[in-house]
């Protein structure tokens, strides 16, 4: 229940849903950062893992990145999808929208979000070029 201060974002329900699913999380960060939002608009992404593990730090701070289906901003039906996804993943990408990351602290969530954004930038810079992402085994050894 909102008690005082500025009116909450129309997507406050999204933050609440993720916090319900992740009792150890104390922060949720959602942005419309350029590179992550651009990736979220691409066709043909793997919905179970939208970005490959291009770097060790991405594998450590983000791990797998599920892509949730498009919902208009403020559409509360997104809450159920986000809560289900957050039960097993602390980071997700909203189709045609942007990233959402939960963390034990605001600093942890921001660190993971920054790594996600930088990996999205690398992904876009490398599109069409042969890449050598970490193997499943390498990524799993570093997963959060």
Image (cartoon, rainbow, N blue to C red):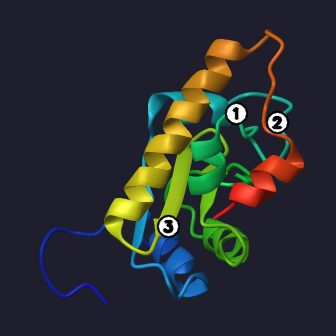
Q: Nearer the viewer, mark 3 or mark 2?
A: 3
> x and y percent of residue 82 in the render?
65, 68
Q: Image quarter for residue 91?
A: bottom right
Going 69% across and 49% down the picture, which residue do you hit?
70
The numbered mark, 3 or 2, whose residue comes first in the sequence reads: 2
Q: CA distance from mark 3 to mark 1?
A: 21 Å
| Place of residue 69 in the rendered image (x, y in percent of width and height, measured from the top left) | 74, 52
Q: Are marks 1 and 2 in contact (CB under 8 Å)?
A: no
Q: Does 16 sit left or right of 39 as displayed?
A: left
- Is residue 14 or residue 49 the one in the foreground? 49
Quadrant that contains the N terminus? bottom left
In which quadrant of the rendered image does the C terminus lie? bottom right
| Residue 58 figure quarter | top right
In front: mark 1 or mark 2? 1
- Assess whether mark 2 and mark 3 are in contact (beta carbons under 8 angstroms): no
Give the residue at mark 2: 45
Disc on the earlier residue, 1 or 2? 2
Q: How far is mark 1 from mark 2, CA to CA?
A: 15 Å
Distance from disc 3 to disc 2, alpha carbons, whole Å, reads: 22 Å
Is residue 9 at least partly visible in the picture?
Answer: no
**Circle 2: element type:** loop
Indicate the secondary structure of the residue bearing disc 3: strand
- At x 42%, y 52%, the residue is 111
Given residues 43 and 50, the one toward you in this image is 50
Q: 10 Å neighbourhood of mark 1: few (<14), some, or many (≥20)?
A: some
Q: Which residue is mark 1?
A: 54
Q: Position of residue 57 (x, y in %)?
A: 57, 45
Q: Is residue 99 above or below residue 81?
A: above
Relative side of 54 to 132, left or right:
left
Q: In which quarter of the view is residue 29 placed?
A: bottom left
What is the number of the mark on residue 102? Answer: 3
Image depth: mark 3 or mark 1 in front:
1
């Amino acid at each position: 229940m909102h008690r005082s201060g500025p009116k909450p974002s129309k997507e406050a329900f999204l933050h609440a849903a993720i916090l319900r699913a992740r009792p150890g999380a104390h922060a949720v960060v959602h942005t419309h950062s350029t590179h992550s939002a651009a990736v979220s608009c691409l066709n043909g992404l793997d919905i179970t893992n939208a970005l490959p593990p291009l770097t060790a730090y991405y594998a450590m701070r983000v791990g797998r990145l599920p892509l949730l289906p498009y919902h208009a901003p403020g559409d509360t039906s997104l809450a159920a999808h986000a809560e289900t996804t957050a039960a097993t993943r602390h980071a997700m990408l909203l189709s045609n929208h942007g990233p959402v990351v939960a963390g034990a602290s605001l600093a942890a969530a921001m660190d993971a979000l920054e790594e996600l954004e930088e990996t999205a930038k690398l992904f876009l810079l490398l599109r069409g070029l042969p890449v050598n992402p970490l193997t499943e085994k390498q990524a799993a050894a570093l997963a959060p």
